Image (cartoon, rainbow, N blue to C red):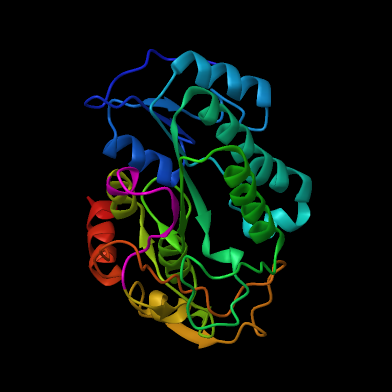
């Protein structure tokens, strides 16, 4: 484990965990003077490492973007999923409680089963895959171990520093005559740059659960149609995956001002990607 010298953002000392990931990379840009840890620096599943590191840094705010996000992979690696997405956040929450730090943690729309058209922050979770169960366990362990938390549920992330749907569509479009994409799963695409910037606001709000996405609802097919021209719709039954997906995972934000529409964010991402 490497402990870098801590810096102060204004009067707030911030620690970012999972700094090497797609969201973590944009968080690092939004909080340039924060202490930044990748997985190589800190294994969040090790309670000992987490407690030692956070005690040493003594941050005011911990932003945890570390997670195991391979939804189908979680079905094959259930123990790892629960360790990283469940036990890890619990370790971080315990350490935050000890040093008196605020914890910002990212959860997922997949804590819901998709039986409703949209879900508010107070809706009752009911996951239908291991990824969702593991992330819900993380939420539970956070609420059990620290009072000053902000759990941000997010969905359909795309950004420049990791594998995402937009890049996959562009790649497949070049390789195939037509690309089949499901038209019966609905959610809200979210640009990591916008989300990272929004975290600054969330830190200053009351503890609790927040649903933060770009505005606008679409199916995966509609999302794909805004990226490539050679896409055709199909049903989930025609495109089976190892992990079951919720049909509707639309997160309703009732606590903060909405972010811009995902189509505007997508235009900026495509410009950034081609720059």
| Magenta-drawn segment | 201-215
Answer with left or right where residue 90 lies relative to residue 7. right
Q: Which quarter of the picture shows residue 112?
A: bottom right
Q: Position of residue 192 (x, y in %)?
A: 36, 52
Q: Residue at x 59, y 77 (%)?
A: 114
- The answer to whether any part of residue 79 appears in the image is yes
Answer with left or right where residue 63 lies relative to residue 107. left
Q: Position of residue 70 (x, y in %)?
A: 61, 54
Image vertical order of residue 72 relative to residue 16, above or below:
below
Q: Nearer the viewer, residue 131 or 137?
A: 137
Image vertical order of residue 193 relative to residue 42, above or below:
below
Q: Position of residue 245 (x, y in %)?
A: 63, 72
Q: Image quadrant for the N terminus?
A: top right
Q: Position of residue 72 (x, y in %)?
A: 67, 60
Q: Residue at x 69, y 76 (%)?
A: 240
Q: Residue at x 47, y 41 (%)?
A: 21
213 in the magenta segment:
yes
69 in the magenta segment:
no
Q: Nearer the viewer, residue 240 or 212?
A: 212
Q: Residue at x 58, y 52 (%)?
A: 69
Q: Which quarter of the picture shows residue 95?
A: top right
Q: Nearer the viewer, residue 140 or 134?
A: 140
- The answer to whether any part of residue 177 appears in the image is no
Q: How many marks?
A: 0
Image vertical order of residue 189 relative to residue 53, above or below:
below
Image vertical order of residue 159 relative to residue 156, above or below:
above
């Amino acid at each position: 484990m490497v402990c870098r010298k801590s810096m102060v953002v204004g009067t707030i000392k911030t620690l970012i965990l999972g700094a090497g990931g797609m969201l973590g990379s944009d968080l690092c840009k939004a909080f340039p003077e924060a202490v930044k840890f990748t997985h190589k620096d800190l294994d969040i599943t090790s309670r000992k490492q987490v407690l030692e590191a956070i005690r040493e840094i003594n941050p005011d705010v911990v932003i945890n973007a570390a997670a195991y996000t391979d939804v189908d992979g979680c079905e094959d690696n259930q123990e790892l999923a629960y360790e990283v997405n469940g036990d890890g956040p619990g370790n971080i929450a315990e350490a935050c409680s000890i040093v008196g730090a605020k914890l910002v943690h990212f959860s997922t729309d997949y804590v819901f089963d998709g039986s409703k058209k949209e879900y508010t922050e107070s809706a009752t979770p009911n996951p239908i895959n291991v990824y969702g169960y593991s992330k819900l366990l993380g939420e539970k362990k956070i609420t059990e171990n620290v009072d000053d938390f902000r759990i941000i549920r997010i969905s359909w992330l795309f950004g420049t520093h990791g594998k995402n749907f937009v890049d996959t569509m562009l790649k497949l479009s070049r390789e195939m005559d037509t690309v089949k994409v499901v038209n019966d799963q609905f959610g809200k695409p979210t640009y990591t740059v916008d989300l990272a910037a929004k975290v600054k606001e969330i830190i200053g709000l009351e503890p609790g659960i927040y649903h933060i996405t770009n505005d606008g609802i679409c199916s995966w097919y509609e999302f794909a149609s805004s990226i490539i021209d050679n896409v055709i719709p199909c049903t989930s039954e025609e495109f089976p995956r190892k992990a079951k997906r919720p049909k509707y995972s639309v997160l309703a934000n009732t606590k903060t001002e909405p972010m811009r529409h995902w189509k505007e964010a997508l235009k900026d991402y495509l410009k950034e990607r081609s720059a």
